[in-house]
Image (cartoon, rainbow, N blue to C red):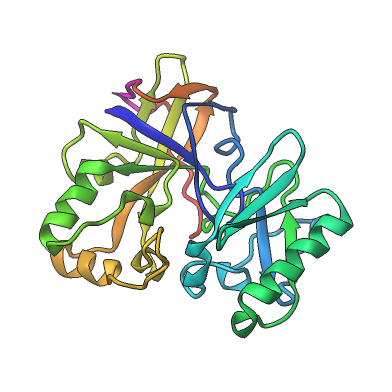
Amino acid sequence: MRVASLYRYPVKGLSPERLSRAELPTGGYFPGDRLFAIENGPSGFDPAEPVHQPKIKYLMLMRNESLARLRTRYDDGSGDLVIGHDGRETRAATGTATGREQLSAFFKAFMPEELRGEPRLLAALEGYRFTDSRSGFVSIINLASVADLEARLGVPVDPLRFRGNVMVEDLPAWAELDLVDRELVAPSGLRLQVIKRIERCAATNVDPVTGARDLQIPKALMKGYGHVDCGIYCRIISGGTLGEGERLRLVEASEPAALGVA
């Protein structure tokens, strides 16, 4: 399969950033992905001892589709998060108390009726990320599967609805769902083990550009295919780089996949 594009989502629920190349570490996560989440009222998350929390405790597209109207980017060097809205930009330093207070103030003004409490920015420590699944290390979306769903629905379906890290092509529609326990190898030596299919929720109903809740993706998947899966999760069993245009080669797995809990 060919890598069509790469994306990271620095803040859970906010917009993607396209990458031309990424360095994936052994046993780690997709770089720069889900580094932050915005707490929607007290979540019980302890940064000193991070434990996976249900996504409903954070601002997220499944319930907060207005987030899709924001255009955000994260500066790795400075740690600044930039939020674009209505022709203006808000820049806040995520590593300072002042910057975090600035972000809280922005979200209180932007979506007051959707908040259950203080919208506090949470940062992931090394070895933890704010993924929907405990095993959501790297996600792959097959563009042929999205195109097949689009043809069935008769309306455009933006692949970014599925918020994947790696978009691939040159793979038959839905063939990725049969790759659990198999391994994918990149030219750099990067080795990914497919560990589970990704079950889709109502977040995919939201247009990633307009924020309109205009489709019923899980319902369409169930009706058309008998499941709600689109995409696969992988873990990084041997680190390396991955770039747009490169090909991932299918090989036999070297060890059984360790399934996570969604």
Which residue is at 58% across, 39% downward?
A: 29
Q: Is residue 7 above or below residue 112?
A: above
Is 252 magenta? The answer is yes
- Residue span colored magenta: 246-253
Is 222 magenta? The answer is no
Q: Nearer the viewer, residue 177 or 160?
A: 160
Residue 255 location, quadrant: top left
Which residue is at 66% across, 48% downward?
A: 35
**Does 92 sit left or right of 128 as displayed?**
right
Q: Is residue 112 above or below residue 218?
A: below
Which residue is at 16% across, 38% downward?
A: 172
Q: Is residue 17 above or below residue 94?
A: above
Dominant secondary structure (helix, strand or loop) of the stretch shown in magenta: loop
Question: Residue 3: x percent and y percent?
Answer: 34, 29
Instruction: Point out the residue furthest to the right here.
Output: 97
**Does 233 sit left or right of 241 as displayed?**
left
Instruction: Point out the residue furthest to the front here.
Output: 87
Question: Residue 193: x percent and y percent?
Answer: 42, 34
Which residue is at 59% across, 81% downward?
A: 114
**Does 161 sit left or right of 177 as displayed?**
right
Residue 44 location, quadrant: bottom right
Q: Nearer the viewer, residue 231 or 110?
A: 110
Question: Residue 177: x percent and y percent?
Answer: 27, 46
Question: Residue 262: x percent and y percent?
Answer: 48, 60
Quarter of the image containing the N terminus? top left
Q: Nearer the viewer, residue 137 or 12?
A: 12
